Amino acid sequence: MIKQIKKIFNFWKKVLKIRGWKPTIVLAEDLGESAAEVYTVDTSKEFTVLIDKNYNEDIKELNHNILHELIHVFLAPYVNYITDTLLFIKNNPNIKINYDKIFKQLKNREEKIVEKLTKILLEHINYT
């Protein structure tokens, strides 16, 4: 399975032009409700993709989940910039914002954008 994951992973990494990042792929079990997850460290351009082998038995599902997580990596510098800006505003005593609410909205919108981009790319670019 890891060989298949790397093949799909490298295909979409090339399509998205994700260069200069140091990836780690981990085959995991029991990620809860998630089929896959990604953790990025923007400053060092490192990321880890966790693939739950219990959810990703079908090639179409595996393809979808890997692409979905790589789109998160693609967007990471922008999301991190927005997050840092919000933190700066939150720590400014002259500006009152509900950081937790805004951050939650940001994460929800990011997830919707990522899923929409995943579906668009899968409709127009066929890995299999």
Image (spheres, grey):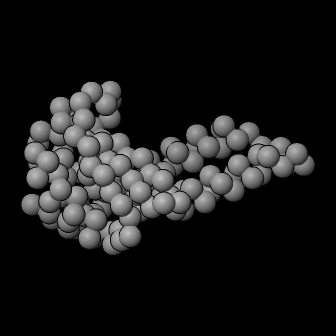
> Number of labelled discs?
0
Residue 56 in picture, x, y percent from top left:
17, 40
Residue 65 can be seen, yes or no: yes
Q: Is residue 76 above or below residue 62?
A: below
Left or right of residue 95, residue 28 in this image: left
Q: Is residue 61 above or below residue 13?
A: above
26 or 91, which is in the foreground? 26
91 or 67, which is in the foreground? 91
Left or right of residue 70, residue 81 in this image: right
Identify which residue is drawn at 61% across, 60% down.
Answer: 81
Residue 90 in picture, x, y percent from top left:
77, 46
Identify which residue is drawn at 57% across, 56% down.
Answer: 80
Identify which residue is drawn at 18% across, 45% down.
Answer: 61
Identify which residue is drawn at 11% across, 53% down.
Answer: 3
**Within the image, what quadrant is residue 23 found in?**
bottom left
Residue 1 in picture, x, y percent from top left:
10, 45
Residue 16 in picture, x, y percent from top left:
32, 69
**Within the image, what quadrant is residue 50 found in?**
top left
Left or right of residue 106, residue 88 in this image: right
Residue 114 can be seen, yes or no: no
Q: Is residue 16 above or below residue 4?
A: below
**Within the image, what quadrant is residue 127 found in?**
bottom left
